[in-house]
Image (tube, rainbow, N blue to C red):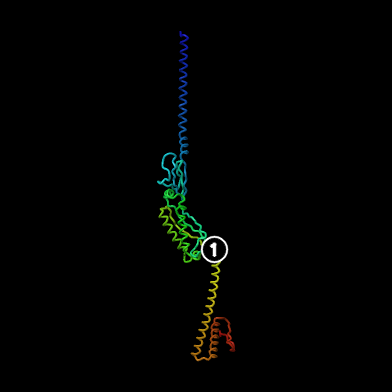
Amino acid sequence: MKTFLEKRLEQKISNLSNQSNQSLKENKMETSTKLTIFGIGTPVLLIILFIICFHSEKVDNGEEGVIIQQPFMVGDEGVNMDMTVATGRVWLWRSNKLIRYNLKPAKITETFDDLITNDRVAVDFISTVFYKVQPGKSNFLHDTFGTNWYANNVAEQFKRFIRNYIRSNKSFALSTNDSNIIDIGQTEIMEMLIAHVNELKLPITITEVVIGKVTLPPNIVAQINETAKETQGKKTEIAGASRELERKQREINKALADQAYAKKFGFTNEQFLTYQALQIEKLRIEMAKEKENVSVIMGNVNPMYNVKK
């Protein structure tokens, strides 16, 4: 028969065994729960990390993207010279950014006020340069010249070409495009601008230069109009005098011809006048032949005859 101490020892052993089994069950359940959570949480965690580390940029049709690298800790900073981004969407590191360049035909307009011409007249006009960014070279453009490539490298030269051409020509010719002077200037300035851009190795294609309507000061316009009015008046007077001289000369020539005719046939003045009157009557009869029921009175001659009979 077991003693009290033995019973007591068996009970403690049983309690320890039950506690150990319970602990093992709890550990298994905890481990199972952790594994389940880890299995579900990994994709979510990866998605969160992706969103934190990356961002997307869209490049529209007719644009080209330049990637600006700005790493948090390691890597090269600056423009990515290995690639440009064409139309579509691209994923970038969160620290990087995208600069977009327009590849479509574009223009820049400059305004010129009170620019002095060769005859010292202040004129106003605008001038426009049309250009395109060369595809695949926007990263070089941004890295070498930046987004302000026109203002920093082209604007002053373009303005200088325009000023020099305007100063070498007269105001009236410029305002009227006399002898196609504006067309010639546009061609010359575009050629000089293309040479300047090529010298800088700017990846830009200059397609056209346009000089707008050259406007003269109001007082100069008034003087030109007054001069034109006076000139036209003089031309009218000269034309009228010329017509009068021509008429007078025709009369003189006719009189000389009549005099020569009368002399040839020995007509007296009275005979020649009678002959001329008969010629006029003959002409009237010839003209009346084509008419219906026309009677012709031959001067003071009677009777009156119907020319159709």
Q: Between 224 and 265, which is closer to the camera in this rendering?
A: 224
277 left or right of 202 in image: right
Residue 232 point in image, percent of width and height: 54, 72
Residue 47 point in image, percent of width and height: 47, 37
Residue type at numbered disc 1: Pro
Secondary structure under badge 1? loop
Q: Between 41 and 131, which is closer to the camera in this rendering?
A: 131
241, above or below 224, in the image:
below
> How many callouts does the rendering have?
1
Quadrant assignment for the C terminus: bottom right
Residue drawn at (54%, 63%) of the image: 217
Question: Going by the picture, which residue comes out furthest to the top?
Answer: 1
261, above or below 239, in the image:
below
Residue 35 point in image, percent of width and height: 45, 29
272, above or below 55, in the image:
below
Residue drawn at (54%, 78%) of the image: 241
Estimate how packed mark 1 is, as few (under 14), some (14 to 19) or many (20 or more) residues with alpha carbons within 10 Å. few
Residue 61 point in image, percent of width and height: 46, 49
The residue indicated by pointer 1 is 217
277, above or below 38, in the image:
below
Q: Between 127 and 263, which is closer to the camera in this rendering?
A: 127
Question: Going by the picture, which residue comes out furthest to the front?
Answer: 120
